[in-house]
Image (tube, rainbow, N blue to C red):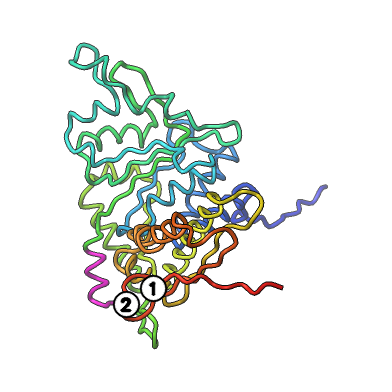
Amino acid sequence: MATAVRVVLNPQRRSPQAAALLETLQARVIGQRQALERVVDTYQTLLAGLNSRQRPLANFLFLGPTGSGKTHVVETLAEALFHSPQALIKVDCAEFQHSHEIAKLVGSPPGYLGHRETHPVLTQEAIDQHQTPEVPMSLVLFDEIEKASDALWQLLLGILDKATLTLGDNRHVSFARCMIFLTSNLGAGEMQSLMQAGLGFAPAGAGQEATLTGSVRHRLEAAAVAAAKRKFSPEFFNRLDHVVVFQPLDAAQLEQVLDLELNAVQARLAETQADGKQEPVQFRCTPAARAALLGEGTDLKFGARHLKRAIERRLVTPLASLLATHQVGNCDRIVVDSIAGVEGLSFLREAVARR
């Protein structure tokens, strides 16, 4: 009689494709590990073929303060899967604050004024346009869902539950191979109040900013979820598979975001000056310059929302001026500094010793 041998399995292990996707996302998105892991788990379910055919792949609600990366996660996922951050269907819900504006999404029924002129956004062709044999799925983002009218929420009930939508001309659209993302700032005010009260902050050492402790993070999460439940009906909320609260970025994470943005500027310099003969202009920011950019572009409450604009204004525009006026050229090294008493950043060309 054969003896059964039991082998311990590891359901936490990820496939090479899923592990590679998680690694890519973590390299481009700072913090928010919970959101990234939930997204990658959904992707692995699709790869295994165990996704439901009667529902979307997953329905996500991303909550949290502005500048914490909710939309950035979805755009980064699109770039990782389809090589473009625009490879998704994005619905700006602020444009649908009145019920009649829903016609822009589904089209007007036959016989209504403007029926032939109104081309629906959510057609099957639009949903499927970015799918490939390697990645047979689509990403649909409803940004700032709390700003939409009740009519859009009602429209979403069928999509989130049965993965189907009927257009104005009675065509049917399937969302069965879609990850659907809803983002919202609901609860951001309550979260800011908790942070301003100083609850749960770890004491800052000399020259360091305070960071959030675990206890306040739990309170922030509870505040955001409670605000969402007050806003949305139970039947809407129960159709969500994952509710993820994006935590405010702490000082160390904001430093990492700055590194990513500065690397992106250096890459732009390399692209515009690439002639295959000489090295492009390179720059480095001193600690004082980094502190100045972070001070203007970020804070613990509002995250990194304004960091890109601060970098464009304080770093990119002056660099463009230096290039356009031929004060710097290929192979030059620039030191970017912040000097007390001097407005803005200071730019110094660094002499390189020739051997």
Residue 193 among those drawn in magenta? yes
**Residue found at x 21% / y 30%:** 101
In-image side of 29 versus 173 (left or right): right
Tag count:
2
In-image side of 236 versus 112 (left or right): right
CA gap between label 1 and label 2 equals: 7 Å
SS for tag 2?
A: loop
Q: Position of residue 13 (x, y in %)?
A: 62, 55
| Residue farthest to the front, as pictured | 326
SS for tag 1?
A: helix
Q: Callout 2: 10 Å neighbours few (<14), some, many (20+)? A: some
Q: Position of residue 32 (x, y in %)?
A: 44, 60
12 lies above or below 332:
above
Q: Main secondary structure of the magenta part?
A: helix
Query: Who is closer to the viewer here, 260 or 214?
Result: 260
Magenta residues span 190-199
Query: Who is closer to the viewer here, 234 or 39?
Result: 39
Residue 87 among those drawn in magenta? no
In-image side of 251 versus 237 (left or right): right
Tell me the amino acid under the disc marked 2: Gly
- Any mark on residue 200, and which? 2
Tell me the amino acid under the disc marked 1: Gly
133 lies above or below 312:
above
In-image side of 285 versus 236 (left or right): right
